[in-house]
Amino acid sequence: MSKSEQLFAEAQQFIPGGVNSPVRAFRAVGGTPLFIQRAEGAYLYDADGKRYIDYVQSWGPMVLGHAHPEVIEAVVEQAQSGLSFGAPTELETELAEELCRLWPNMDLVRFVNSGTEATMSAIRLARGFTGRDKIVKFEGCYHGHSDSLLVKAGSGALTMGVPSSPGVPAALADHTITLSYNDADGVRSCFEELGGQIACIIVEPVAGNMNCIPPVAGFLETLREVCDQHGALLILDEVMTGFRVSLTGAQGFFDIEADLTTLGKVIGGGMPVGAFGGKREIMEQIAPLGPVYQAGTLSGNPVAMVAGLETLRLVQESGFYEPLITKTERLVEGILAAGKAAGIPITANKAGSMFGFFFTEEPQVTNYQQVMDCSNERFNQFFHGMLEEGVYLAPASYEAGFMSAAHSDEDIEATIAAAERVFIRID
Ligand code: PLP
């Protein structure tokens, strides 16, 4: 029995399913989850001492790679001054100022502890600001696990087969309208019928929770247009895409104006941080300035703030994003070529340092239904083959992959060589 198998058996005695977030359990792909001992740069080391080239990167935050020395140093130094004060610190202002300076339309920002809290609070604020109850989201997008948003959701909810979770009151789910991603006409006709009742649209501007689906030309523009026409707010959920697709996320890349933006992952550098921010007149509705309540014991935690500050300082160094994007392109091209050479029907999408592979005959995947039609069986064989080869991919076909600054060209060539060997073994 491997050490991971032993640790997993023990974990299941005390933790539901042995994990604290469902996809970690490897249910979709089968087998035993790796228990991780430590991580450094592009690599994870499991409890059995095996090294893996990691393309999960803690599900996105570790854009610098794991345990970046300067981030660790800042965290250790800050920890020595105290872990949490429950009172304001200068660090919160520094990180908030940085976000407001970098992101267009972010006049004010509030820190929370996770992406879930960020989107949940942004939705409440949109409802409070507009006085309307209904929200629009897209099938296969995941915005965390709050009630209103766990309707036809992506990521683990999709992997576990519960995109609309039991426990979400029907009365609440009734207020969530779910439309098809990349279907601008569907959005237009929904707003023609219900526009006056809709508080907001929330969208992943590149969908990263049903594998990786970039927006088709005109889709995000249509969302902006209908929101403007009908007095609804546009919430761009950049928890995953923020500081990943570009320094200013997908909204900078696609030049789309958000009323509210939600952030997480990279802005905490691996510590639990989320944020929501946006236009002043909207954000001023949040307590204590306005009546929409939102709070948090550990929000703006000083250790998390320095991890975020250090990470954002490093990603702003000149030339940070170009190599990240080039490496992502090389990885995607190499794996596609390997798949094709082995006669495997495969296609891929990418956006900045995010990518995803689809086992399908379709030349291009742009919507949820096409994702659903891909071969999970082939993905699972690919996943386990790569794991054996020492490459750690997300343990489910509905997740995006992530490149980090720490991945070397040799890591990428080694990954492509591993894929060449694995594809030959796949049926
Ligand atoms: N929004 C998006 C786009 C995400 O990808 C995620 C998590 O993957 C969330 C929100 C929820 O963030 P968290 O897991 O930190 O609660």
Image (spheres, helix red, strand yellow):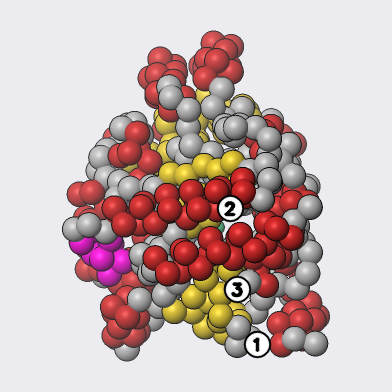
Badge 1 is on which residue? 48
Q: Nearer the viewer, residue 244 or 272?
A: 244
Position of 406 relative to 261 (above/below): below
The quarter of the picture where residue 65 lies is bottom left
Residue 347 at x, y percent in the picture: 59, 41
Please report whichever mark, 3 or 1, sits nearer to the chain's N-terminal start: 1
Mark 3 closeness class: few <14, some 14–19, many ≥20 residues within 10 Å: many
Badge 2 is on which residue? 338
The amino acid beneath tag 3 is Gly
Please report whichever mark, 2 or 1, sits nearer to the chain's N-terminal start: 1
Which of labels 3 and 1 is toward the front? 3
Q: CA distance from mark 3 to mark 2?
A: 17 Å
Task: Please tell me whether mark 3 sits on a helix, a strand or a loop.
Answer: loop
Residue 391 at x, y percent in the picture: 58, 68
Mark 2 closeness class: few <14, some 14–19, many ≥20 residues within 10 Å: many
Position of 347 relative to 218 (above/below): below
Contact? badges 3 and 2 (CB < 8 Å):
no
Quarter containing the N terminus: bottom right
Q: Which mark is residue 351?
A: none
Q: CA distance from mark 3 to mark 1?
A: 13 Å
Q: Which mark is residue 390?
A: 3
Q: Can residue 253 be seen by looking at this rendering?
A: yes
Contact? badges 2 and 1 (CB < 8 Å):
no
Highlighted range, magenta: 310-317
The amino acid beneath tag 2 is Ala
Q: CA distance from mark 2 to mark 1?
A: 30 Å
Position of 68 relative to 414 (above/below): below
Q: Can residue 148 be seen by looking at this rendering?
A: no
Residue 339 at x, y percent in the picture: 62, 50
Name which residue lies at 47% across and 55% down: 331
Name which residue lies at 40% across and 23% down: 221
Name which residue lies at 63% across and 71% down: 389
